Amino acid sequence: MSLKVVITGASSGIGEALAREYAKQGAILGLIARRAGVLAQLKDTLPTTCHTYAADVRDAQAMQQAAGDFIKQQGCPDVVIANAGISGGTLTEYPQDLEASQAILDTNFMGMVKTFQPFLAGMREQRRGMLVGIASISGFRGLPGASAYSASKAAAISYLESLRVELHGSGVRVLTVCPGFIATPMTANNPYPMPFIISAEAAAKKIISAIAFRRKFLVIPWQMAILGRILKMLPLWLYDREFSKAPRKPRGL
């Protein structure tokens, strides 16, 4: 029986790479993104059964409708990957950045909740399935110039851990994925060095492997896993001194 996989943010980056890799494996796909035209083009290139939904993860009703249609046609999915996310430099002192900050939090955190919610009851009932949330190592510590993005990913990490514990013993598993720098449209305009950057295709293969092995937490690439541990251990005085000089994502990018 073919694996059934739902992916948000599927029109580019990691989401597109996941869709292409799962399609090679013969999975039945439910792909969700805001750009209907791009989704349609992607569907035409995939050698598998594929349902596409033009929806914004911030819209709970749209997400419920997409989930309902997929379940009606294919049944409850085996894997739901909340990948949709946006980034941008934000600074608290600028009132015009309030809207950008809200959009980042609504997409990266609440969008994840709204992605999982319509599928969870069915997964609980069948006592199987995996919820996969794409967070970021940016959620390990607050990064200067990216307060909203770091906050959204920190919230995602904590949310996914809460969900994992809530679902312990239910048969439904939760995987938290924390990528470092991945070569995607989101990072294309970063005006600073991005150490250990890997392709979206390489990231997708590692994520799919972690799902297959039922892992609970994944940092990619492996070098960032080491760096992440070091970052968490840095005392506040040292972290503040060193990272106050770190390059910052420009506002609006």
Image: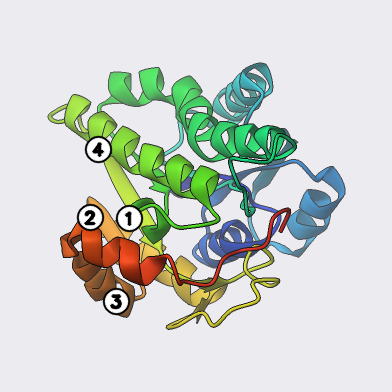
Q: Which mark is residue 222?
A: 3
Disc 4 element: helix
Left or right: where 206 falls relative to 109: left
Disc 2 element: loop
Q: Is residue 198 visible?
A: yes
In the rendered image, residue 173, in percent from the top left (x then y), is placed at 26, 39
Marks 1 and 4, Cα distance to the nearest angstrom? 16 Å
Marks 2 and 4, Cα distance to the nearest angstrom? 13 Å
Camera-nearest label, 2 or 4: 4
Q: Is residue 6 visible?
A: no
Marks 1 and 2, Cα distance to the nearest angstrom? 6 Å
Residue designated by label 4? 161
Image quarter for residue 145? Answer: bottom right
Disc 3 element: helix
State the residue at coordinates (32%, 55%).
Answer: 211
In the rendered image, residue 206, in percent from the top left (x then y), is placed at 38, 69
Cβ–Cβ below 8 Å for labels 4 and 3?
Answer: no
Q: Residues within 10 Å of mark 2 (few under 14, many from 20)?
A: some
Cβ–Cβ below 8 Å for labels 1 and 2?
Answer: yes
Image quarter for residue 163? Answer: top left
First in sequence: mark 2 vs mark 3: 2
Residue designated by label 1? 211
Marks 2 and 3, Cα distance to the nearest angstrom? 15 Å
